[in-house]
Image (cartoon, rainbow, N blue to C red):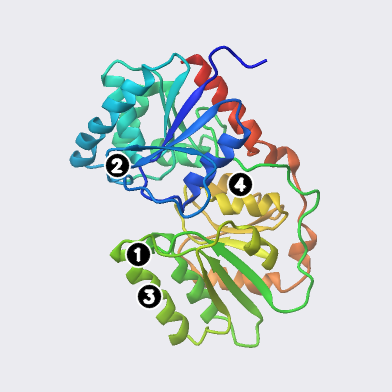
Amino acid sequence: MPAANPLTVLQYTGYVDDRGGIVTSIRHLAAAGDFRSILGVSRRFRAGSELSLEVMGLPPIEAEKITPATMWRARAVALPVRDWLRGGPGRVFHGHSRAGLCVALWLHALGESRAVVSVHCYGRQRWFYRAAKRILDGRLRWLTPAMRRHYYGGGQVDWTDCVPNGVPGRPVPTMHRWPGQPPLRIGGAGQLTANKRWHLVLEALARLPPDIPVEFYHAGGPTGDAASAAYAEALTLSTWRLGLEKRVHWLGWQPSSAPLLTKVDAVVVPFQHESFSLVALEALYAGIPVMAARGGGPDDLVLQGVNGWLFPADDPEALASLWRQLLQPAPWNELRMDPQHLGRFSAAHVAGQWAEIYATL
């Protein structure tokens, strides 16, 4: 029998499109949760695929920048959100972007306590996030212990104040083994932006002689701004300049990561400050090992030598060396599935954590 006042959660990003890991995470959360979810976006929003979510358009805002202008614009978002929250006792605001954090702070200032935040980034303005944590307290959660260490330093390794992203289903029972026949296929996914460091993959490949059979497949594309478009063009030019056109495959935006994961033997995350990497988690659930730069969210996903490998950030030679090692069977034979570790990241478990937090409001 349905509850008298079922929870309805406004999962707010402020984005203008749905091509990104945060929106995918929200979809997983909505599908698994015992609550109804609405996606809060800019009024200029255009869906790139079937969302399966109701969408609420709100005043436009720079979703991923914290500036005085963004903070002021967030007030124009917070006012209609406050009116929406007052429409029923079972309504909650959940901010998922930098703009979402700003809106939540305004809601707090306006006297509305039904607002929570997931921090999805390794922001430069650490003081701002620490101040926001003091204000919102338990209503602000980090994705992983590595993210909390970024903002506070120290050696915390537990999951206090952390709620990760999640993926549906259960992990497969065994880890993938490279068949031992060339080529070794490495996958990557995400936006083509300079901070994602995809050029390091090209530099690592260029360090391998042509007779070492490693290929790279990337699903994703530019974000629509000029800087991202220029970076995407530079990657294409570098692919040809380095003579990698037969070993690198830019696949463009894909509806999901599933086709990529059926094609590759391992997934690479080259960015040191990757906040989480949903594709890495999806790969691990599919039994595909992950290699990731140390220093970000994958530190809490990848178990060294168990379900993948960590390598020094911004070091293409270290990445190339790792690929040389993976052309031998020994590293693959040591891989094993750890369902207890991955259980923390199931969408059902994560949705249950958030349902408990929502209920306290």
Q: Earlier in the sequence, mark 4 or mark 2?
A: 2
Q: Is residue 310 above or below residue 130?
A: below
Q: Which residue is mark 2?
A: 125
Residue 104's spot in the image, x, y percent? Answer: 34, 28
Q: Is residue 18 left or right of residue 185?
A: left
Q: Please rate how many residues cluster around mark 3, counting C-alpha atoms within 10 Å: few if below 14, some from 14 to 19, many from 20.
A: some
Find the distance from the CA under tag 2 to the CA under tag 1: 22 Å
Q: Please rate how many residues cluster around mark 1, counting C-alpha atoms within 10 Å: few if below 14, some from 14 to 19, many from 20.
A: some
Find the distance from the CA under tag 4 to the CA under tag 2: 25 Å
Residue 260's spot in the image, x, y percent? Answer: 63, 64
Q: Which residue is mark 4?
A: 301
Q: Which residue is mark 3?
A: 233
Q: Residue at x 63, y 34 (%)?
A: 32
| Mark 4 and mark 2 residues within 8 Å of each other at the beta carbon | no
Q: Is residue 96 above or below residue 184?
A: above
Q: Which mark is residue 228?
A: 1
Question: Mark 3, mark 4: which one is toward the viewer?
Answer: 3
Which residue type does callout 3 highlight? Glu
| Mark 2 and mark 1 residues within 8 Å of each other at the beta carbon | no
Question: Mark 1, mark 4: which one is toward the viewer?
Answer: 1
Which residue type does callout 4 highlight? Leu
- Which quarter of the figure has residue 97? top left
- Which quarter of the figure has residue 118? top left
Residue 304's spot in the image, x, y percent? Answer: 66, 53
Q: Earlier in the sequence, mark 1 or mark 4?
A: 1
Q: Residue at x 47, y 52 (%)?
A: 20
Q: Disc 2 on helix, strand or loop?
A: loop
Observer-nearest of 321 and 361: 361
Which residue type does callout 1 highlight? Ser
Q: Earlier in the sequence, mark 3 or mark 1?
A: 1
Q: Is residue 51 above or below residue 323?
A: above
